[in-house]
Image (cartoon, helix red, strand yellow):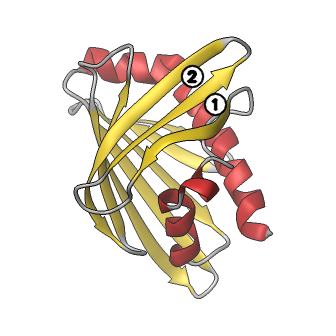
Amino acid sequence: MMTATNREAEINIDDKLPSIRIVREFDAPAKAVFRAHSEPELFVQWIGPDSLDSSSVDRWDCRSGGEWRYVSIREDEEHWFRGCFHEVRPNELIVQTFSYEPWPDNVSLGRFVFEDLSPARCRLTATSLVDTFEARDAFVASGMEVGVQEGYRKLDWLLAR
């Protein structure tokens, strides 16, 4: 397993499965980090790299069986993302699909586990599984690490407010 450790998030790229695991700790309880992932008005404030504006949500129904869709905009480019929430357990777990609309065949299955480490600190473990190593590698090459790191820095700021 190849590991790329960053100052804030640890990103693990599995060499046996087409998956990516991201582990990140936050100075906030799991309940707050879960809210930032499940409430659209919070989600859009932190998701993605600084170069994108992701403030427009088309659909957001964060419950088991619900669906979501939002757009990220950079200058004149629109990037639409969508998926379904398969399992949502408040403050504990979100299992969802994720797809970039121009590549509808490259759907990932994401599992987000929210774990309290203390009353004021938690760990988020996010695992994404795709169909092929090629799709996984394309996801990594798309700038995913920049989006993860910059997004989580914005989430730190949001949680501190």
Quarter of the picture holding the C terminus: bottom right
Q: Is residue 8 left or right of residue 100?
A: right
Q: Nearer the viewer, residue 118 or 103?
A: 103
Could you say where residue 71 lies in the image, as x and y percent from the top left?
A: 54, 30
| x 21%, y 32%: residue | 16
Asked if labels 1 and 2 touch by Cβ distance under 8 angstroms, the answer is yes
Image: 80 above or below 62 = above
Mark 2, Cα crowd under 10 Å, few <14 / some 14-19 / many 20+, is: few
Q: Is residue 159 left or right of residue 35?
A: right
Q: Nearer the viewer, residue 65 or 7?
A: 65
Give the number of marks: 2
Mark 1, Cα crowd under 10 Å, few <14 / some 14-19 / many 20+, is: some
Quarter of the picture holding the N terminus: top left
- Residue 64, by quadrant, is bottom left
- The label shown at residue 58 is none
**Which element carries disc 1, helix, strand or loop?**
helix
Image: 43 above or below 69 = below
**Which element carries disc 2, helix, strand or loop?**
helix
Q: Which residue is mark 1?
A: 146
| x 49%, y 67%: residue | 34
Please state which amino acid type lies under the numbered disc 1: Val
Could you say where residue 40 lies in the image, as x and y percent from the top left?
A: 55, 54
Please state which amino acid type lies under the numbered disc 2: Gly
Could you say where residue 56 lies in the image, as x and y percent from the top left?
A: 60, 38
Q: Is residue 7 left or right of residue 32?
A: right
The answer to whether residue 139 is seen in the rendering is yes
- Disc 2 and disc 1: Cα gap in Å? 6 Å
Could you say where residue 47 lies in the image, as x and y percent from the top left?
A: 60, 43
Q: Which residue is mark 2?
A: 143
The answer to whether residue 6 is seen in the rendering is no
Image: 97 above or below 144 = below
